[in-house]
């Protein structure tokens, strides 16, 4: 085949692909980043045949959230096939020294893996605040960091929040960051610290400390161990709920946890 013929054939293929994409023909669209090319289509294995963490995440209730680290935080969420939280396995989530509020002996522990650049994490945080007021004395909420690689300032913001935690002001700092999305540069973080009356010299020193960097990395590693793919992900007494679910979904999980005691 001549060089001209080859070029013509390639142009035809490109044109056909573009048309398929424009009309939404998913059979001909490029695979999402990170997916393998398979030579034949086969039915997906049953959930019980997959790794427990992956199977649990697929069965867990899904809502708006960053369910794929390759997409932006404002991604649409997968929502099909969600099972009630009570049908999900109870997973052991290490809380460690994570910032937490609520009675230590509260009957329900809520652990949220979150990212300060994620708008859906801000939404989930507000929902948790409402539920804490509703279930006074019955909830303990712990915050774990899951800074996604696609968010340039998420890790720095996580370290800054722990620097505020060193001075007893984590939750105030947490609320201020989510109230001002996008204002996560160093100067903005320092302004928040100053507005909260923190010792700014100590704050700056702590932000750069290897200890706080290690603490963020430990949370990240725990999220990876659990098979988390994005944020927010919430555990209610160990039962996984994916995404910024509406209050009624979390309320159902909390009521189920209380009834089981």
Image (spheres, grey):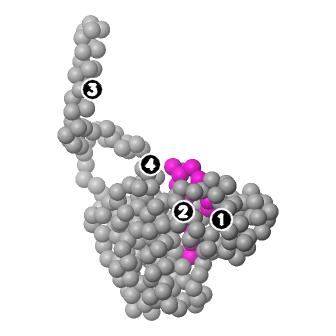
Label 3 belongs to which residue?
Answer: 14
Mark 3 against mark 1, which lies toward the viewer? 1
Q: Is mark 2 on a helix, strand or loop?
A: loop
Residue 11, labelled with which disc? none
Q: Name the residue under label 2.
A: 180
Report if the CB atoms under discs 1 and 2 are less than 8 Å apart: yes
Label 4 secondary element: loop
Camera sees residue 215 = no
Q: Quadrant of the N terminus?
A: top left
Q: Nearer the viewer, residue 83 or 156?
A: 156
**Sequence-first disc among 3 and 1:** 3
Estimate how packed mark 3 is, as few (under 14), some (14 to 19) or many (20 or more) residues with alpha carbons within 10 Å: few
Q: Quadrant of the C terminus?
A: bottom left
First in sequence, mark 2 or 3: give its number. 3
> Which residue is at the front of the view, 129 or 93?
129
Q: How far apart are marks 1 and 2 (CA)?
A: 10 Å
| Residue at numbered disc 1 | 192
**Residue 120 vertical placement versus 148 (above, below):** below
Q: Which of marks 2 and 4 is nearer the N terminus?
A: 4
- Structural distance between the alpha carbons of marks 2 and 4: 24 Å
Instruction: Please provide the residue range marked out in magenta.
Output: 142-159
Q: Which of 163 and 228 is in front in this view?
A: 163
Q: Residue 70 carries which label?
A: 4
Mark 1 or mark 4: which comes first in sequence? 4
Residue 217, horizontal then vertical, whole percent: 63, 59
Q: Mark 1 falls on what kind of element?
A: helix
Residue 46 is covered by the magenta coloring: no
Q: Residue at image x 49%, y 84%?
A: 132
Q: Position of residue 52 (x, y in %)?
A: 42, 66
């Amino acid at each position: 085949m001549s060089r001209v013929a080859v070029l013509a054939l390639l142009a035809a293929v490109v044109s056909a692909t573009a048309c398929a994409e424009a009309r939404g023909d998913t059979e001909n669209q490029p695979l999402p980043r990170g997916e393998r090319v398979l030579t034949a289509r086969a039915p997906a294995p049953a959930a019980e045949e997959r790794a427990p963490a992956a199977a649990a995440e697929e069965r867990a209730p899904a809502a708006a959230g960053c369910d794929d680290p390759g997409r932006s935080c404002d991604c649409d969420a997968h929502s099909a096939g969600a099972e009630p939280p009570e049908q999900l396995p109870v997973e052991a989530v290490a809380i460690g020294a994570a910032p937490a509020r609520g009675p230590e002996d509260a009957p329900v522990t809520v652990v949220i893996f979150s990212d300060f650049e994620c708008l859906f994490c801000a939404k989930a945080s507000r929902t948790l605040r409402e539920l804490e007021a509703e279930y006074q004395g019955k909830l303990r909420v712990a915050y774990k960091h899951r800074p996604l690689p696609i968010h340039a300032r998420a890790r720095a913001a996580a370290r800054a929040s722990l620097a505020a935690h060193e001075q007893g002001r984590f939750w105030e700092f947490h609320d201020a960051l989510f109230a001002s999305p996008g204002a996560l540069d160093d100067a903005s973080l320092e302004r928040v610290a100053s507005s909260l009356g923190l010792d700014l010299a100590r704050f700056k020193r702590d932000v750069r400390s290897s200890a706080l960097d290690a603490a963020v990395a430990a949370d990240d590693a725990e999220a990876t161990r659990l098979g988390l793919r994005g944020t927010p992900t919430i555990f209610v007494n160990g039962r996984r709920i994916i995404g910024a679910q509406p209050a009624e979904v979390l309320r159902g999980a909390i009521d189920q946890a209380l009834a089981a005691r």
